Amino acid sequence: MPELAEAEFFRKRWHQAGAGKRVRVVLLHPGAKIFRGTSPAALRRALTGARLVSSEARAKQMLFRFSGGAWLGVHLGMSGELHVEAADWAVGKHDHLVLVTPRQALVFTDPRMFGRVQFHRGTEAPGWWARIAPAITSETFTVEAVAAFLRRRAKAPIKAVLLMQERFPGVGNWMADEILWRAAIHPARRAGSLSPAETRTLWRECRRVCRLALDTIAGRGDYLPPDLNAHIPKTWLFWHRWEDGGRCPRTGVPLVREEIGGRTTCWSPGRQGGVES
């Protein structure tokens, strides 16, 4: 499932191709479940003839603002992708939303339809967007806020806690594993067992991994990498976590994969110690 940096990558892809362009035609599959809770007819009417004004990514979601007070929200789910094609693109059965501009087509493809499209019309951003938790890279994401949240989830495995979007927006499975590996914390540790020093380390690595992921996956400024994961260093756990026989990039010890907190988790016995450490 796309996480923080992947959402920013796909936002940039659509924005760079469509900013300022007028939508000539809106093509969609009205019965697709990605439109649950949304009126495809209202979306088509509002976006036809509108221009893409601005866009933003938060957590795992994207918001595209169009002229005329139209707001398009996109969540990619597990298999969704935003891509850009020629204006005469032949729409496939998994291309559930296509915005055709004079020269290009902005395409939302989702084979498994776990993604979602939301639509709002008004002068202000929709409430479902405003309710997303503050970014991990923001000033409001403090050590104190993290410590308080861990106390409230004291009995839960720290891996499961890192996936809770109300405090760690945009963090998904691979980012949680990366954060815990860098912080040298076993993913099965109870959230309430972390010492103040470990909590501070966790907070620091959350912010660091988010910044590094945004810089390497989504690029800096207007730069968009040609491939989603092309610039992630091989020193990250990311490249080794799904390898059969994969080894820790720092210790060389074989990695372990197991289910923790309901999710497949990768960790390094040579770096992350025991559950009770």
Image (spheres, helix red, strand yellow):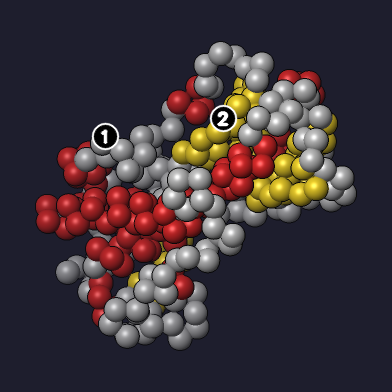
Dividing the picture into quadrants, the one containing residue 141 is top left
Q: How many marks?
A: 2
**Crowdedness of circle 1 by 10 Å Cα count: few (<14), some, many (20+)?**
few
Task: Decide: is 30 above or below 198.
Answer: above
Place of residue 260 in the rendered image (x, y in percent of width and height, measured from the top left): 39, 64
Q: CA distance from mark 1 to mark 2?
A: 24 Å
Name the quarter where the N terminus is drawn.
bottom right
Which residue occupies the foreground of this view, 54 or 249? 54
Determine the secondary structure under disc 1.
loop
Inspect this view and state whether residue 64 appears: yes
Name the quarter where the C terminus is drawn.
bottom left
Q: Is residue 179 left or right of residue 217?
A: left
Place of residue 103 in the rendered image (x, y in percent of width and height, measured from the top left): 79, 40
Place of residue 189 in the rendered image (x, y in percent of width and height, measured from the top left): 26, 62
> Which numbered disc covers residue 140?
1
Q: Which residue is mark 2?
A: 54
Task: Decide: is 12 above or below 182.
Answer: above
Place of residue 238 in the rendered image (x, y in percent of width and height, measured from the top left): 43, 68
Of the image marks 1 and 2, the number of the one nearer the N terminus: 2
Inspect this view and state whether residue 2 appears: no
Residue shown at the point (66%, 42%) measured from the top left: 17
Which residue occupies the foreground of this view, 38 or 216? 216
Residue shown at the point (87%, 45%) measured from the top left: 88
**Crowdedness of circle 2 by 10 Å Cα count: few (<14), some, many (20+)?**
some
Q: Residue furthest top?
A: 123
Residue shown at the point (44%, 28%) measured from the top left: 131
Badge 1 amino acid: Thr
Badge 2 amino acid: Ser
Residue shown at the point (65%, 54%) measured from the top left: 79
- Closer to the camera: disc 1 or disc 2? 2
Q: Is residue 118 left or right of residue 50?
A: left
